Image: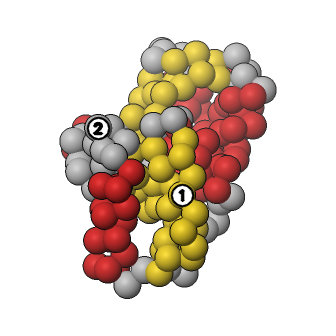
Amino acid sequence: MVALEQARRIVQTCAEQHGAVWFDDTVVERGGYWFFRVGNIGSCGVIVDKADGLLSIMGSALSPDDCFWGHEHGFSPDLVLLRVTKVHDHRRTIELLLHVVTNGPPRRGNPNPKRAWLAAQLQSLPCELGPCRLWLSIPVFRGATQQRWFEYEVLEPREQAGQVCR
């Protein structure tokens, strides 16, 4: 377990290495992590996990609330796998996935083979999609989660498992 002062030292080291500045001394404590307002242009701050001291840099495209929600639900600015476990609304789920899943079949005559490919993938659950970058789609996933379009897990890609710093 990482104490607050240890987390502050982790952030200070990262800030010095990357030329980041402290926006203010505010520390937001949430269940399993702390949020520090330190960064550069394009960053609203960093999160340090209490369990292992892992530091994650948050971008500035999302609100801090969206960043917190994403972090608490396994989203990362890095590549992740999306495991779909249950679908309640096939049409909306496929439309969302069309925009966030980057892998899929090549175009061969079919004007939108990805839609058909996604529909086929969702016939056999659970299915894993990715790796893909979902971070900027957090607001869409929040809405889909609240409206229960589908159920999912966000996982680290196998080749990144155990990575110390993102």
Q: Is residue 163 left or right of residue 68?
A: left
Identify whether 151 is placed above or below 19: above
Q: Amino acid at mark 1?
A: Val
Residue hosting label 2: 1
Which type of secondary structure does the marked residue at label 2 adopt? loop
Q: How is the image coloured?
A: secondary structure
Q: Is residue 78 left or right of residue 84?
A: left
Q: Amino acid at mark 2?
A: Met
Label 1 crowding class (10 Å Cα cut-off): few <14, some 14-19, many 20+? some
Residue at position x 67%, y 50% from top? 65
As measured in the structure, the alpha-carbon distance from the residue carrying label 1 to the one carrying label 2 is: 18 Å
Which type of secondary structure does the marked residue at label 1 adopt? strand
Q: Quadrant of residue 129?
A: top left
Q: Nearer the viewer, residue 147 or 26?
A: 26
Query: How many numbered badges does the structure rendering display?
Result: 2
Q: Is residue 22 visible to us here?
A: yes
Q: Is residue 68 left or right of residue 160?
A: right
Identify whether 131 is placed above or below 43: above
Q: Is residue 165 left or right of residue 34?
A: left
Q: Are marks 1 and 2 in contact (CB under 8 Å)?
A: no
Q: Nearer the viewer, residue 30 or 83?
A: 30
Q: As drawn, which residue projects farthest toward the bottom?
A: 19
Residue 27: give its label: 1
